Image (cartoon, helix red, strand yellow):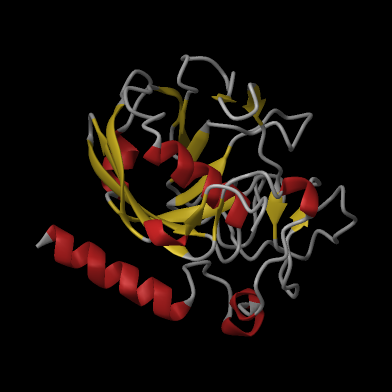
């Protein structure tokens, strides 16, 4: 029954184009493929939607990744899932009524993923589509890009948003750490909040949000798998 529920939910999201919570008139990013800058061509990407399931010590959590709006961030996440990077990784941050966050595989604050292809830590750029635009802004927060505060991201921090963590000073320092928001308050609400425009949302929890709300520091990801959409993953666009 749960598998059927996930399949139906994924099919609905794919048909509607996502779960951003923004009005239809501003939900036109799906109509134009994202043009990823050449400097990020060596990074993995997702070219559509994918469904990932995390098995945690508090139960399963299903996440739809949106490669139509955040192809590099969603691609990085699905790549790490397929490589088994998150298996055994602990949650190291819990903010009541706000979010829960995963540590990096070393149990630190994003020491990052060491990419064997380059011998370096993979860093992922911030990637945000502002409302009214069809292409993401890369490498800058919306404020740094000069976007007025009244303009919100297409992918907002609604309850269940999944985003890539990075340091406060460097929006391009993300690698493996991600977080899940799960409440409406002054920092997480449909009217805009502290996180919107400053961090990349690359997916949403579609099942198991109550399990995510139970997660605390020390809980772990026991398993992670791609349920649907693996064929839309590209390890790298270099040479294609």
Residue 7 image offset from top left, x and y in percent: 24, 67
Residue 76 image offset from top left, x and y in percent: 54, 43
In the depicted structure, whether residue 61 falls above or below residue 214: below
Residue for point 45% across, 79% down? 16
Residue 188 can be seen, yes or no: no
Residue 10 in the figure: left or right of residue 163? left
Residue for point 23% across, 33% down? 58
Q: Quadrant of the C terminus?
A: bottom right
Residue 99 in the figure: left or right of residue 170? left
In the depicted structure, whether residue 23 falls above or below residue 49: below
Residue 99 can be seen, yes or no: yes
Residue for point 31% across, 23% down? 219
Residue at the farthest front position? 239
Instruction: Please identify the quarter of the rendering in which residue 89 is found.
Output: top left
Q: Quadrant of the N terminus?
A: bottom left
Foreground residue among 149 and 58? 58
Give the number of marks: 0
Residue for point 30% across, 44% down? 225
Residue at the farthest left position? 1
């Amino acid at each position: 029954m749960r598998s059927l529920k996930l399949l139906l939910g994924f099919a609905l999201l794919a048909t509607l184009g996502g779960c951003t919570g923004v009005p239809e008139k501003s939900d036109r990013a799906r109509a134009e493929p994202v043009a990823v800058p050449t400097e990020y061509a060596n990074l993995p990407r997702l070219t559509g939607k994918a469904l990932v399931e995390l098995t945690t010590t508090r139960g399963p959590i299903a996440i739809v990744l949106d490669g139509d709006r955040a192809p590099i961030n969603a691609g990085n996440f699905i790549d790490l899932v397929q490589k088994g990077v998150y298996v055994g990784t602990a949650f190291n941050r819990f903010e009541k009524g706000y979010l829960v966050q995963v540590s990096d595989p070393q149990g630190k604050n994003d020491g990052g993923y060491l990419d064997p292809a380059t011998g370096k830590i993979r860093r992922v750029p911030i990637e945000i589509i502002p409302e009214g635009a069809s292409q993401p802004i890369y490498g800058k927060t919306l404020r740094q890009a000069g976007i007025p505060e009244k303009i919100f991201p297409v992918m907002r921090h609604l309850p269940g948003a999944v985003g890539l963590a990075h340091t406060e000073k460097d929006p391009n320092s993300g690698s493996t750490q991600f977080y899940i928001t799960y409440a409406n308050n002054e920092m997480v609400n449909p009217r805009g909040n502290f996180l919107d425009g400053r961090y990349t949302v690359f997916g949403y929890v579609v099942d198991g949000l109550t399990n995510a709300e139970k997660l605390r520091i020390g809980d772990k990801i026991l398993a992670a798998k791609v349920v649907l959409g693996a064929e839309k993953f590209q390890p790298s666009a270099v040479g294609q």
